[in-house]
Amino acid sequence: MTTAAASIRKPPGYLAPAVGLGTFVAFLVIIEVCIRIGWLNRFIIPPPSEIIGSFARLFGEEHIVRRFFLTAGECLVAGTMVTFVGITIGVLMQRYAILQRACETWVAAFASAPLVLTYPLFMVIFGRNAWTIIMMGFLSALPPVILKTIEGIASTRKVLVNVGRSFNLNETQQFWKILFPSALPTIFVGVRLGLIFALINIVGTEFLINFGGLGQLINDLAERYDLAGTYAAICFVILVSVLFFVALEKAERWLRPVD
Amino acid sequence: MAETGRLTQAARVSTPAISPVTLLRVAIILAVLAAWEFLAHSGWLYRDVVPSLLSIARALGALLTDRNYYFNLGVTAAEIGVALAIGGAAGLAVGLLLGGNRFLSRAFEPYLYYLGPTPKIIFFPVMIMWFGVGPESKVALGTLSCFFPIALNVAAGMRQIDQVLIRVGKSFRASTTQMVFKIYLPAMRHPIINGVRLGFGFALIGTLLAETKLSNKGIGFLIIQTYSVFDMPGMYAMLIVLFVLAIGANALIGKLGGLDTIKRK
């Protein structure tokens, strides 16, 4: 997917992005007009101007910044947990070939299972609190981190491994000085994917169990039938996840060695 | 010499009846089950949070013989099927359009690319407003969830088609329809199937999560009902069946599309 995005950005020129943005703005204007002349029901789709107007209310009355930090904190805890646990499991599985051969397909299958649907189970185990939300983020983020760690270490170039051997490095040194640094860019791809899954599932679980930060705000506003507010909060969450996604991509590009 | 060679070969074929990997797998499974059973009887956790294996097996048996379960399974399967059909068709059309036209791709694909990995369940209140509280809103959420991965995969797949194939089509003066059906789609079989596989996973999650939030039928509804009446063995049974079905369907789509063969190359 990264290569696809890179190839989109390659040729210079601002016409295409301008057309994209222009279409988006035109779409909003058309919706606004349709609502004003009564073709669309404003109690189902609030006018875009009203949605933009209610942003101020989200910041003032709904304390969206505090909620943002709550969700971000949950992501941070889940992300830290998944980085340590996922990389450790990945390293162990790569180190012991038999473990990898026995469990790698399980991890891959685990990745394709609808893990987020276990949230009622976690609500029973942890209660309706932040730990349920963090665990949902953690679980969904685990498979990509494990799989990418295995891939990263396994694809270390033979030359580098031989350099380590010729310096008579012991196994710990070989791991910290050769294997881990060489695998780091690939591992980060896994961590990036994991963090995206974690954010999606954390906001989703907040919405579903009506607890915590941004997800709960959407649920709250929808239950109050504050339509413009609901749409504005959805836009805010999308904006946050897009920015998060862009930041992770930038970090990944910065980490990747220049070939 | 030849004889010994044959002998060792025969021996090699016959010994790995139980390979060390299989042994390890069985050992891991047994260890997990034993630990589970121990935890169930230890009294360390609240009763029924970790129910005994026997009660889960009993719940599983009851679930699989329950006609009501199959009705709800049918409802959910139909919702996912419709969502995948609508989202897949839309994704395929948009993907072909964006993959085939560089300008359109540069104008609109970044939106899809960045909107793809955002949480879709938060659109559920909007979907309820638009489509009501019935199965339609679940289908809508499933459609929204699976559209993005399919569109992005098709667009990326279209750009990766071997230029030689496209030139062959052009040299035969194929029309646009012929190009789509004789060149593009067959050449993009793997990215399309992969997109459908991803899309299926997203549609499944979208539909079921929506069902757990607000519905009166479907698997998601049954799962959240076991939560509200605290029927833990029932919940475990339902999650086990759901996971087996989801993983199985995912593997099946991959197998049908020949995704397992390209990995080996």
Image: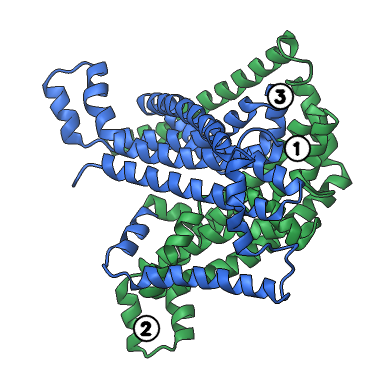
Query: Three-letter amino acid code at disc 3?
Result: Gly
Q: In the rendered image of this protein, does residue B224 appear above or below residue A49?
A: above
Asked whether residue A207 appears in the rendered view, the answer is: yes
Q: Is residue B47 left or right of residue B254?
A: right
Asked whether residue A151 appears in the rendered view, the answer is: no
Q: What residue is shown at x 35% (from left), y 78% (from top)?
A: B166
For mark 2, give the secondary structure: helix
Query: In the rendering, at what x and y percent does residue B85 appear?
Result: 64, 66
Residue at the disc numbered 1: B238
> Disc 1 sits on a residue from what chain?
B
Residue at the disc numbered 3: A127
The chain coloured green in the image: B
Residue at the disc numbered 2: B169
How many numbered dots are placed on residues in this image? 3
> Disc 2 sits on a residue from what chain?
B
For mark 3, give the secondary structure: loop
Residue situated in front as seen by the camera: A195 or B26: A195
Disc 2 to disc 3, C-alpha distance: 61 Å
Query: In the rendering, at what x and y percent does residue A197 appear?
Result: 52, 41
Query: Three-letter amino acid code at disc 2?
Result: Gly
Disc 3 to disc 1, C-alpha distance: 20 Å
The chain coloured blue in the image: A
Going from the N terminus, do you reach mark 1 or mark 2 first? 2
